[in-house]
Amino acid sequence: MRIVLAVLIKDGRVISYATNEHKDCRREGYPTGVGYELCAGCNYPNHAEYKAVQGQSGGTLYLIGHTYACEPCQEAIRKAGATLVII
């Protein structure tokens, strides 16, 4: 499983962060974005970027360890008024 870190920065301060790390992933060895139905921990409410923006407003979300955010996560980021930066 790929560990992803999402850090939300606002006014030069870290206001939120989250990871997607969980144990016993049934998607081990599957390509990114495939087989989410196999593992409850891999569903978007458990994605780092989704968790980091919950209850937040604005800021810049830095996504580390991944090359994109899925559509539900992108929507949550937009609703929070954050800007997504992928590192």
Image (cartoon, rainbow, N blue to C red):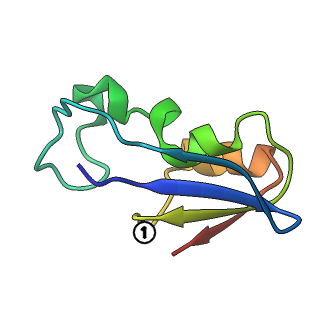
Left or right: 31 as drawn, with respect to 87: left
Residue at 20%, 34% in the rendered image: 25
Which of 51/68 is in front? 51
User: Which amino acid type corresponds to the residue marked 1 in the rendered image?
Assistant: Thr
Left or right: 6 as drawn, with respect to 15: left
Q: Which residue occupies the extreme left position in the image?
A: 29
Residue at 79%, 44% in the rendered image: 79
Query: Which percent across, then down, holds residue 12?
Result: 83, 69
Residue at 57%, 49% in the rendered image: 49
Left or right: 87 as drawn, with respect to 85: left
Query: Which percent across, then down, holds residue 13?
Result: 80, 61
Quadrant position of residue 28: top left
Query: Which percent across, then down, holds residue 51?
Result: 59, 38
Q: Which residue occupies the extreme front position in the image?
A: 13
Q: Secondary structure at mark 1?
A: loop
Residue at 34%, 53% in the rendered image: 3
Q: Is residue 46 above or below residue 57?
A: above
Q: Which residue is mark 1?
A: 67
Quadrant position of residue 62: bottom right
Q: Is residue 52 above or below residue 32?
A: above
Q: Residues within 10 Å of mark 1 (few under 14, many from 20)?
A: few
Quadrant position of residue 31: bottom left
Q: Which residue occupies the extreme top position in the image?
A: 40
